[in-house]
Image (spheres, rainbow, N blue to C red):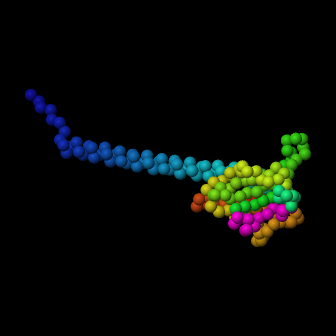
């Protein structure tokens, strides 16, 4: 009679150890893959926000006007205002823009635009008329912004601009998280 011999305890422990090592390695690989996926998704969302923001800013600057903006009381403000004071207080830039048509024929329209950094989000406010207040519902362009700087690359001074002295180029430096995004925009009516 043949006696079938089974596995010893040592052999079973070795097999369990090998299987647990394989499971541990595959679990760590799966974990790092999931982390990579979420990091790439986060960066993709930031990139999408940047693409939309640059298109909106580009469109506004291409349609920038040399007209004076007004406050709610009709008092004229300076044109195309950029200043360290405004940036420190949240407003990055403020100007008047026009469109070739307002949808009611070919009359065109003019309205005020300003960009404000609020609670880490770059918001775009619009006023449909030159002397009306800005809308209370801004367009949120980019979130997680820690710093914004707007410069005139062809000049070293920050100021408001006279109608004949609107900048031809504006350089935006936007810090998102730990990454700097730099873009130069052309101003059409300069």
Among all residues in the image, which is located at the extreme bottom? 156
Viewer-proximal residue among 44 and 128? 128
Which of the image's four quarters has the C terminus?
bottom right
Q: Position of residue 29 (x, y in %)?
A: 42, 48
- Residue 14 visible in this rendered orientation of the protein: yes
Among all residues in the image, which is located at the extreme top? 1
Q: Position of residue 145 (x, y in %)?
A: 63, 58
- Identify which residue is drawn at 73% across, 51% down: 136
Viewer-proximal residue among 21 and 100? 100
- Identify which residue is drawn at 90% across, 45% down: 107
Viewer-proximal residue among 130 and 52? 130
Q: Position of residue 150 (x, y in %)?
A: 72, 64
Quarter of image, res 172? bottom right
Quarter of image, res 166? bottom right
Q: Taking 35 as reference, is 146 left or right?
A: right
Which of the image's four quarters has the N terminus?
top left
Q: Which residues are magenta?
A: 76-89
- Identify which residue is drawn at 62% across, 52% down: 46
Q: Position of residue 3 (x, y in %)?
A: 12, 32
Among all residues in the image, which is located at the extreme front? 73
Q: Taking 47 as reference, is 168 left or right?
A: right
- Identify which residue is drawn at 61% across, 56% down: 144
Q: Main secondary structure of the magenta part?
A: loop
- Residue 187 visible in this rendered orientation of the protein: no
């Amino acid at each position: 009679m043949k006696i079938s011999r089974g596995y010893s305890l040592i052999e079973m422990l070795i097999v369990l150890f090998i299987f647990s090592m394989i499971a541990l390695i595959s679990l760590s690989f799966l974990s790092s893959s999931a982390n990579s996926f979420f990091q790439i998704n986060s960066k993709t969302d930031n990139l999408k926000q940047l693409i939309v923001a640059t298109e909106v800013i580009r469109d506004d600057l291409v349609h920038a006007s040399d007209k004076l903006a007004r406050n709610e009381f009709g008092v004229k403000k300076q044109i195309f205002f950029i200043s360290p004071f405004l940036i420190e207080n949240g407003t990055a830039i403020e100007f008047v823009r026009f469109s070739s048509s307002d949808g009611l024929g070919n009359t065109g329209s003019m309205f005020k635009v300003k960009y404000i950094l609020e609670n880490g989000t770059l918001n775009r406010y619009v006023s449909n008329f030159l002397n009306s207040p800005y809308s209370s519902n801004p367009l949120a362009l980019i979130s997680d912004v820690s710093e914004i700087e707007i410069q005139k690359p062809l000049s070293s001074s920050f100021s408001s601009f006279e109608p004949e002295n609107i900048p031809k180029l504006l350089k935006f430096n936007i810090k998102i998280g730990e990454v700097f995004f730099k873009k130069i925009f052309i101003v059409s009516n300069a």
